[in-house]
Structure formats: structure tokens, C-alpha cells
Image: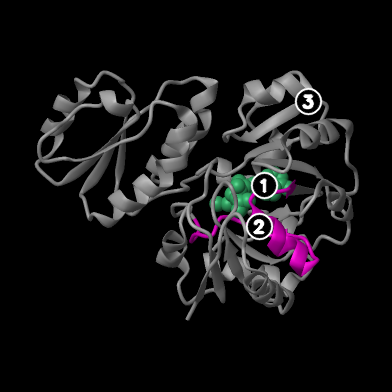
């Protein structure tokens, strides 16, 4: 059984945080809210504890984990080098939804970095996450709290859909405000690389560090399998429509007589279609991201034959949402 402890997201009770920190320190797993998605946390310095994350998620050991720290100063305990670009990015975006890949410190177990020379680090903004890390007194390795390749959780119930009985505890702090995982950047090379888009956009990054190259270099490809393959996928098949014209909906309705759902990003201007489970998300990228995984989880639970998604525009502000949708629809 997984213990669910409700906590106030802005002012969590000290005894709940203490209980969760004690689970972490005894080598167990705790799912906790961050501003992006729920994380599945373990003591990042304890290889047996970290191994339990891979077991609970069914995650391949080739996919490295993000190490979460309570403040910018503590990052120096887990990195070998904290270059000027990282200093500037952390000053601007931490605490917050940005993960920075740098050279690893030798204290970080191989399992966390998938044996590679780098470590991904992030200082989350969510009060529950920061208080948990502080109370534990150790950095916390945490992937998203879902089974490998499945949808990321933005509610405690989503965590339980995949991991009930497989982890010791969930701190239920309600909804995650950003709704999609952190932006991941690699600053180990001569040029800053965006490995995963999120609510911190390329435009925002470039204001701080100059030119940013989108996509992994050859040296990152093997270490970021999450960038290449099926990920964030509901059980229900997904079809992406690249045409924004709501007229596409009448075409879709001819594709099949089965039960299907439709997600669009047209805000209140969305189409209305008889007999279809409609889910309209905001035409603002930040608000749409906040509701994205919740929409996909609830459509997935509606036992539809398939889900159609009218894609939002191909602009930097929508990159994070588009990335999750493209991988949700990928078959392998
Ligand atoms: O918002 C988030 O980042 C959430 C919350 C819990 O913090 N965490 C999260 O973790 O999304 P996960 O494991 O689901 O995604 C981490 C991504 C993966 O694509 C992984 O391949 C990449 O970061 N990554 C981790 N360490 C890396 C490294 N050393 N080099 C390159 N990519 C790395
Ligand atoms: Mg994940």
C-alpha cells in the first residue's frame, strides 16, 4: 500500500514533510509535487535507493535522472564544475522549471547519470519539494512519477494510476502549476544546447546566454533516450492533426465510427462536434501546458478508441506542448 499524505502546497505541515524525509533517508521512494510534474524521489547519494526508482518505474537504466537540490548553493555538492553559463541561468531561472546538465561530482552514483560524465541538476520552486529536500538534508534524484513511457502525473491521483503499491508514499499537494516537465539544457559544450523544451522557452534562454542550439549533439543522444522515443503516452492511440482549421474536425469524424475524443488549443473559439468527447485547452501556451497531462489522463480514463489532437502552432512558446504531444503519439 502506498500512503497518501495530503499537504498544503504553500505551507506544508512540518510533520508530513518529516515523515516523507525519513522515508527518503531510509532508502524508500516518495512521490512529491513540483511546479512542473510530480517527481518520484529517492536519496540521490544512495545507489540502492536510486535502483528502486528504476524498478518502480520499469525505467531502462540507460536513462539518467535529474538531481534536485534545495538551493543554488547546494548544487556545488553534486557537480564537478559550475560554469559561467550555469551561474547565469540559475540566477535568472532558479528556483524554477529549468534543468542544467553539467559535469558530475564523483559522489553522484553511476546509476543516477547512467554511467555518463554529466549530471542533470534542478532547484525546484515548489515549496513542498524544497522543504522535503531540506528536511532530508540530501539531494533527491527524481524522474517524473509515472511508469516508463506513460503519461507524466500532475495530480496525486495520476501518480497512483501507475505506481500505487509500488512506492512508499505520495505527498498530495494538489495540481502542479506548470504542468509539463522542466526545460533541459546542456551547458558542458561550447554552445548551450536545448535537450527538452518546457515552459522556459528558447527565447527566454537566449536573453540570458546568447545563442541556444535546439536538439542534442551526437554526444547527448545516447544519454537522453527520453528525447528520441515513445514517451508521455496514454494507453489510448493518439492521432495528431497538423491543420489548425476546425474544418479538419468534419474530416476526422469520417475516419471511424468508433468512440473518440478531441483535444484542441483554440480556447473558447473551439469547435463543437456531436458525439465526440471534446477537451478544449487554452490558446495561451502556459495555461494549456498546465492542463495538458490532466486532459490526456482524463481522456485516457474515458476508454475511447482513439484521441485526435489539433496541434498548436509551431512557434517557440508552444515547443514544450508540441514536444509532449508528438511523443505521446509516437508508437515506438
Ligand atoms: O520537471 C522535471 O524535470 C521533472 C520533475 C520531477 O523535476 N522530472 C523529470 O524527470 O521530468 P525525467 O526523468 O522524467 O526526465 C529527465 C530527462 C530525461 O529526458 C533524461 O534523459 C534527461 O532529463 N537527462 C537526465 N540526466 C541527463 C544527463 N546527464 N544528460 C542528458 N540528459 C539527461
Ligand atoms: Mg519522465
Whether residues under marks 2 and 3 lie with C-beta atoms below 8 angstroms apart, the answer is no
Q: Earlier in the sequence, mark 1 or mark 3?
A: 1
Label 1 sits on a secondary structure element that is loop
Q: Is residue 290 visible?
A: yes
Q: Is mark 1 within 8 Å of ligand 1?
A: no
Q: Is mark 2 within 8 Å of ligand 1?
A: yes
Q: Is residue 127 left or right of residue 175?
A: right
Residue of label 2: 129
In the depicted structure, whether residue 132 falls above or below residue 270: below
**Alpha carbon distance from label 1 to label 2:** 8 Å
Task: State yes or no: residue 142 in magenta.
Answer: yes
Relative height, residue 136 to residue 291 (above, below): below
**Residue 219 image offset from top left, x and y in percent:** 73, 38
Q: Which mark is residue 191?
A: 3
The residue carrying mark 1 is 125
Question: Does residue 152 appear left or right of residue 200 in this picture?
Answer: left
The kind of secondary structure element at disc 2 is: helix
Front of the two marks 2 and 3: 2
Horizontal and vertical percent position of residue 327: 45, 41
Q: Can residue 126 be found in the magenta stretch?
A: yes
Q: Dot 1: within a 10 Å radius of its alpha carbon, few (fewer than 14), some, or many (20 or more) residues? A: some
295 horizontally vs 261: left or right:
right
Magenta stretch?
A: 121-148
Amino acid at each position: 500500500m502506498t500512503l497518501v499524505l495530503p499537504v498544503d502546497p504553500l505551507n506544508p505541515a512540518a510533520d508530513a514533510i518529516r515523515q516523507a524525509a525519513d522515508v527518503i533517508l531510509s532508502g524508500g521512494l516518495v512521490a512529491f509535487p513540483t511546479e512542473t510534474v510530480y517527481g518520484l524521489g529517492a536519496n540521490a547519494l544512495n545507489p540502492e535507493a536510486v535502483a528502486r526508482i528504476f524498478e518502480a518505474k520499469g525505467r531502462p537504466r540507460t536513462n539518467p535522472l535529474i538531481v534536485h537540490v534545495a538551493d543554488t548553493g547546494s548544487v556545488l555538492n553534486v557537480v564537478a564544475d559550475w560554469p559561467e553559463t550555469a551561474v547565469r541561468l540559475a540566477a535568472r531561472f532558479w528556483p524554477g522549471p529549468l534543468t542544467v546538465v553539467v559535469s558530475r561530482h564523483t559522489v553522484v552514483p553511476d546509476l543516477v547519470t547512467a554511467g555518463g560524465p554529466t549530471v542533470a541538476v534542478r532547484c525546484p520552486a515548489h515549496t513542498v519539494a524544497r522543504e522535503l529536500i531540506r528536511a532530508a538534508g540530501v539531494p533527491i534524484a527524481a524522474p517524473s512519477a509515472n511508469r516508463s513511457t506513460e503519461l507524466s502525473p500532475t495530480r496525486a491521483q495520476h501518480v497512483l494510476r501507475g505506481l500505487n503499491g509500488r512506492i512508499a508514499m505520495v505527498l498530495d499537494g494538489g495540481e502542479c502549476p506548470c504542468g509539463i516537465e522542466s526545460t533541459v539544457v546542456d551547458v558542458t559544450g561550447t554552445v548551450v544546447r536545448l535537450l527538452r523544451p518546457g515552459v522556459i522557452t528558447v527565447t527566454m534562454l537566449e536573453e540570458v546566454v546568447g545563442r541556444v542550439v535546439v536538439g542534442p549533439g551526437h554526444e547527448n543522444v545516447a544519454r537522453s533516450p527520453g528525447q528520441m522515443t515513445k514517451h508521455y503516452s496514454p494507453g489510448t492511440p493518439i492521432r495528431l492533426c497538423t491543420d489548425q482549421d476546425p474544418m479538419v474536425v468534419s474530416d476526422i469524424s469520417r475516419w471511424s465510427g468508433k468512440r473518440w475524443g478531441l483535444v484542441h488549443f483554440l480556447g473558447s473559439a473551439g469547435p463543437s462536434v456531436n458525439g465526440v468527447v471534446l477537451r478544449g485547452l487554452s490558446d495561451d501556451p502556459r495555461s494549456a501546458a498546465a492542463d495538458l497531462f490532466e486532459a490526456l489522463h482524463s481522456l485516457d480514463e474515458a476508454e475511447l478508441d482513439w484521441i485526435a489532437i489539433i496541434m498548436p502552432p509551431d512557434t517557440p512558446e508552444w515547443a514544450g506542448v508540441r514536444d509532449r504531444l508528438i511523443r505521446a503519439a509516437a508508437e515506438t
